[in-house]
Image: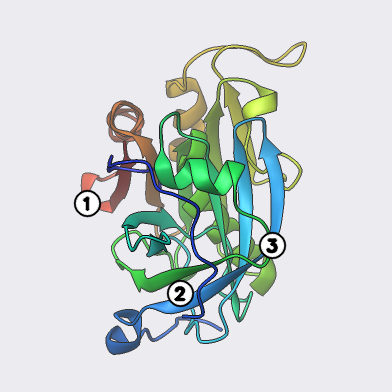
Amino acid sequence: MTEALSSPAVSPVTRFAVPGRIAVNEHVAAVWQTATLTEVRRETPYASTFRFAVPGWQGHLPGQHLLLRLTAEDGYTAQRHYSIASPPEDAGHIELTLDHVEGGEVSGWFHTVAEPGDRVEVRGPLSGFFAWPGDRPALLVGAGSGVVPLMSMVRHHRARGLSVPLRMLVSARGPEELIYARELGAETTPVFTRSAPDGVPVGRMSAAHVAPLLAEPPEGGWEAYVCGSNSFAEHASRLLVEAGQPVDRIRIERFG
């Protein structure tokens, strides 16, 4: 998820000391926990993955998100909702992949100030609507950083060696802006809107990308998960419906 709030610039944060379907304890999910940054990985020129150690993390379902809180030395706090990129099998750790949003106080701090050893607070996991427990065929459709919660599903599918069908369509402006490009495999079809390798067409996601998957759906049909900006979510959902996907089997996560 990208940032949805705007507030005064925050000063550097104090380094304060503060398998299968996962049964989430709502009481535990409501408690703030300390998360220690352990690693930063560059994904694209504008996005990086931040890995945290969270010893008390109870686990999550792929597709869920968390609430993150930064506290400055003067007591000012900023909170943001972020999708979880890591699979539930990564016990005791969570990963967030954040775009560097222009003017974003939280993403700006992460991309320009944060370093291993820094601590933040997290609460969650939150929301079960967009979660995929791995028990049904999943058709994942995302654009830009909308691939983040979908990648948690892909990683879960791989970690468990699940046989249930899973396919992903992901849109990016060009190969250099395709998040997780090094990890994407045969389950993924990239769509490039501005530039592409030789021989790969350039253009917006279209019926030509969606229709083949709906023409021969797996047994039981697809559960579709769409994540991206408002405009992308509307466009992709329309493509799915026109190709025959039942409206009540499309789950949408919007950001902006």
Residue 74 seen in render: yes
Amino acid at pointer 1: Asp
Dot 2 or dot 3, earlier in sequence = 2
Dot 1 or dot 3, earlier in sequence = 3
Q: Position of residue 19 (x, y in %)?
A: 56, 84
- Quick check: 174 above or below 137? above
Cα gap from disc 1 to disc 3, whole angstroms:
43 Å
Q: Nearer the viewer, residue 170 or 218?
A: 170
Q: Nearer the viewer, residue 55 or 60?
A: 55
What's the residue at 59%, 57% (across, down)?
154
Residue 217 seen in render: no
Q: Position of residue 223 (x, y in %)?
A: 38, 54
Q: Nearer the viewer, residue 232 or 55?
A: 55
Cα gap from disc 2 to disc 3, whole angstroms:
23 Å
Q: Residue furthest left?
A: 248
Q: Residue furthest front?
A: 74
Callout 2 touching callout 3 (CB < 8 Å) = no
Describe residue 106's horizontal placement relative to residue 238 as left or right: right
Q: Position of residue 123 (x, y in %)?
A: 37, 73
Q: Label 2: state its secondary structure.
A: loop
- Quick check: 63 above or below 183? below
Q: Which residue is mark 1?
A: 248
Q: Which residue is mark 3?
A: 116
Q: Which residue is mark 2?
A: 60
Describe residue 164's horizontal placement relative to residue 79 as left or right: right
